[in-house]
Amino acid sequence: TAQLINGRKIAHALKAEVTAEVAALADAGIACGLATVLVGDDYGSVAYVRRIGRIAEELGVAYEQVLLPGTTTQDELLATIDRLNRDPAVSGVLVLRPLPPQISEVDVFRALDPQKDIESVHPENAGLLALGTPRFVPSTAASVFHLLDSWLDEVGEDRAAFYHRSLIVVVGRSNNVGKPAISLAYDREAAMMSVDEWASREGRLGWHTRQADVLVVAAGVAGLIRAEHVRPGAVVIDVGINPREDPGTGQVRMVGDVEFDEARGRARAIAPVPGGVGPVTDVWLIRNTVHAATHHARKVS
Ligand code: NAD
């Protein structure tokens, strides 16, 4: 069975680095704060902001959690963004997706101050990322590759050699997860393939995924990846966060996009949900916030 890629352990090590960076900022008297904006009550997003609150507190970063009803208008949301852009206590802003249908995602992203856009969704930052010179590396995609890099170090494989001979297949093509993951695959000079809902129609999902040496799954569909979708010996990174109700107890728990027990029988290594990508993403977000605060302090001083 597959090795487990332990996101909690890897996050713990990363936390030590970020804690030192936060302390250095505090010593220098530089304010560092994170704000998240959640519109509505998407399951994954609600779970995510809850975790961010905990980790910000643990690492000593000021945190403002903005919760807006699902009926919020575009203008109301833009007014909130404007306020956070101007607030000197806020170094980084994260707008949770998905946004409700009455809101234009791209207009909201464009309204963010690029210096505070820690997820690189503003066109300027998305462009820098695509050019291979990111201002901020978006936390989820960063986490995927941080897990892979850490695992390679642990098993003693040369990172460059591994990526050069691997085909990375990313299922899901969103602007905040799938596409940034592809950009990072470019940076590692790996071969890559991007698969979305359309490309996986008519049972073609497996045709794509079975070619993967590294399978990254960020579709947001519980149990999408079954045993037959996994090439024996592949490394599987599950990004999905979905609710699944236990038919016996009625209790809802968090599951990924990968049917864990099935994939475990075929993969060489697997990052599970929960306990894989999530914990590292959380720390990375704080890391980006710290970097935003540092950049900002350099500019004004
Ligand atoms: P999204 O809904 O914006 O994008 C989903 C993508 O998957 C789309 O490109 C869509 O075409 C594709 N897709 C949907 N069904 C598919 C199918 N059957 N086959 C192939 N492709 C399919 O979602 P997102 O924001 O990219 O997030 C994806 C998942 O990752 C969600 O479950 C989300 O909760 C989770 N997520 C986790 C973290 C984390 O830190 N672990 C962070 C962000 C998002």
Image (spheres, rainbow, N blue to C red):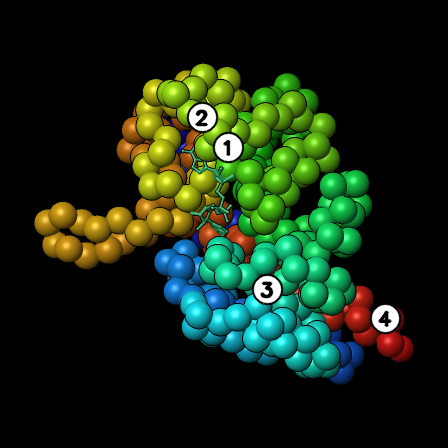
Q: Secondary structure at mark 4?
A: helix
Given this view, does label 1 or label 3 mark the residue nearer the observer? 1
Residue where numbered disc 4 is placed: 298
Nearer to us: label 3 or label 2: 2
* Residue drawn where x is 47% and y is 52% of the image: 278
Number of the front mark, 4 or 2? 2
- Cα–Cα span, label 1 and label 3: 24 Å
Closer to the camera: disc 4 or disc 3? 3
Secondary element at image label 1: loop
Q: Is residue 111 above or below residue 88?
A: above
Kindly identify which numbered label has been placed on residue 196. Answer: 1
Asked if residue 235 is positioned above or below residue 131 in the image, the reply reads: above
The residue at the point 87 percent across, 71 percent down is 299
Q: In the image, which disc is placed on residue 94?
A: 3
- Residue type highlighted by circle 2: Ser
Label 4 crowd bin: few (<14), some (14–19), many (20+), radius 10 Å:
few
Residue 241 pos. (x, y %): 40, 49
Q: Is mark 2 within 8 Å of ligand 1?
A: yes
Q: Are marks 2 and 1 in contact (CB under 8 Å)?
A: yes
Whether residue 38 appears in this view of the structure is: yes
The span from disc 4 to disc 1 (Cα, nearest Å) is 40 Å
Task: First in sequence, mark 4 or 2: give its number.
Answer: 2
Say whether marks 1 and 3 touch (CB < 8 Å).
Answer: no
Question: Which comes before the other along the chain, label 3 or label 2?
Answer: 3
Residue 228: quadrant of the picture:
top left
Q: Is mark 1 within 8 Å of ligand 1?
A: yes
